Amino acid sequence: MAFGWKLYGDGKTPPLGEAVAPDERLSWPRTVGIGAQHVVAMFGATFVFPLLMGLDANLAIMMSGVATILFLLIVQGKVPSYLGSSASFVGGVIAVRAAGGSDAEVLGALLVSGVVLALVGLLIHLVGVRVVNRVLPPAVTGAVVMLIGFNLAPVATATYWVQDQWVALATMAFVIVASLLLRGFLGRISILLGLVFGYLLSILLDLTAGPITSVLPGANLRDAAGEPCDVAGPYCLATPFAHDRVDFSAVGSSPWFGLPSFNGPSFSFNFALLVLPAVIALVAENAGHVKAVAEMTRRDLDPMIGRAVFADGVTTVVATAVGGSPTTTYAENIGVMAATRVYSTAAYYVAALVAIVLGLVPKFGALINAIPGGVLGGITVVLYGMIGLLGAKIWKENRVDFANPINLVPLAAGIVIAVGNSGNDAPLLQFSEEFSLGGIALGTTVAVVGWHVARALAPAEMKASLLREGPHPEAGSTFGSVHGAEPVASSPERDRP
C-alpha cells in the first residue's frame, strides 16, 4: 500500500475504542488537520537539533519531509512515522567541530553513519532482531544513550547559557512547568512552547531593558593584547560586547521564496568514528518506535523492524548528502497518533509536503536562525539531560543489575570517559596525527567492547545472573533483553528528543 487509502467510515473522527488504520484515512480536510498536528509535533526538535549541530535548519526541515516520504515508501506504508532531525548525533558533531572539522566533514561523517545504519537494518531484516540484541544488550544500549546525552552538558552551559543567563533560566523554568502542568498534546510540545516563550521574552527585554553584554561564539574575537583577530583559537578568543538578544537583520533581507543552500560532504575516517556511536542509539530508537506503533495498531510489525532501520539509514544518507540533518523516527508524532487514534499514513504525507514547502521559504529559515543563544541554553539543559536519562530508562525497563560487575565496571568507565572528555579538544588516546579517540567515540568503544570482554571473562555465576535481566512484565522496553528475547512494546510516551 502506498497511496490507495480507504475512507474510514464516514470520514469523521473514530469513536471511542476504534482507530483509523495506516491504510485508511479520514476525509481530506480532517486528514490535513491531523497532518498539521504532526508538523507542530515534530517542528521544535527538527529545527533545534540542526542549529545545535551548525547545520541549515531550513534545509533540515525540508529534508525531513523528503525523508518521511522515502521512509513510508520503503516500509510500504505499514509503519506510520515522521522522520525528523536526530538528537543522537549532536554530541558527535560537536566533537567533530571541536577537532576542527568543517561543514563538509561533518556532513561526510553523518553520511557514513547513515550507510552503517542502513547496513545494520539489512542485517536485522536478514537474520532477525535477536542477533542485534545479543551484540547490543540493554545494559550497553542504555550506557551509550546516557553518555551521548551527558557528553553535551558543556555545550548547554558554557556555550548557550552564558550568552544570557536570565533568559536561559526563565526558559528552562517555563519548559519544566509546562511539561508538568500541560496535558496531552500541549505537554508533548513543551520544548517548542518554551522556545517560543524565550524568543518573545528576549524581544521584550530588547525593547525594555536594552542590549546585553555577553560573549557570542565567533564574534568580537580578540587576542591577548586586546587586538581584533580573525580565526578563533587558543590565542584568539570571543570576548564580551554589547548586542541585542535578537537580530532580525537577516530576516528582513531574506526572500520569501527560494531554494535553501545545498552543501556536499567530504570524508574523514577519524571524524566518522566520532559520530558512529549514535548508530547504536538509533537502532534501539527505531526498534522501540516500531514496537510502539505495533502495539497501538494491534499489528505484528516485527518483520518491519529491519526495514525501518534500513529506511532511517537511507534517509540519513539522502539528507546529509545535500547538507541536511541526520534523521530518526519521532516519538512526538507517535504521541499524536496515540492521542488522535489516527494512524493513517495519509496524514504523514500531508505533514511531509508542508515541511517541504516551509523549507522553500528562506525568510522562515532566517527567523529560526535568529533564536537567541540564551533561549537555546534554557532548552538544551533540559533536552540534553532528557537524552542522558533515557539511558537510565532503558536500564530500568530491562532490570539491568548493577550489582553484577559485568554491567557495572565497563559501563562506568565508558560513561566517565565520554562525560569527562566532553568539551575538551584534546583526545584521550592519540594514535597518530590523523587518528585519535576521545569523548563519545572512546566511551562507546569501552562500553561495548568492555562489556563483551567482561562477559567472556566473568565466572559462571555472573553470566547466569544476566539471564534474570529483561523487560518488566508490565513495562514497555526500548529494546530486547540480554539473552535474546524479542523486544516488547514500547510506550508511546517514550523519549521526546
Image (tube, grey):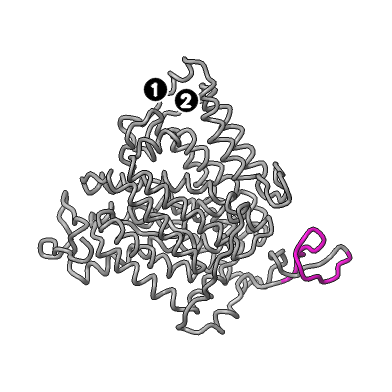
Q: Position of residue 363 (x, y in %)?
A: 50, 79
Identify the residue shown where x is 46% and y is 20%.
463
- Closest to the observer: 363 or 312? 312
Disc 2 crowd, CA 10 A, few/some/many (<14, 14-19, 20+): some
Res 468 label: 1
Q: How many marks?
A: 2
Q: Position of residue 14 (x, y in %)?
A: 16, 57
What secondary structure is marked by label 1? loop
Identify the residue shown where x is 49% and y is 78%.
362
> Magenta span has 388?
no
Q: Which residues are magenta?
A: 225-242
- The answer to which image quadrant residue 226 occupies is bottom right
- Closest to the observer: 176 or 132? 132
Q: Can I make out residue 235 in this image? A: yes
| Mark 1: amino acid | Arg
Identify the residue shown where x is 21% and y is 66%.
3
The quarter of the image holding the N terminus is bottom left
Identify the residue shown where x is 70% and y is 42%.
428
Outermost residue, left direction?
9
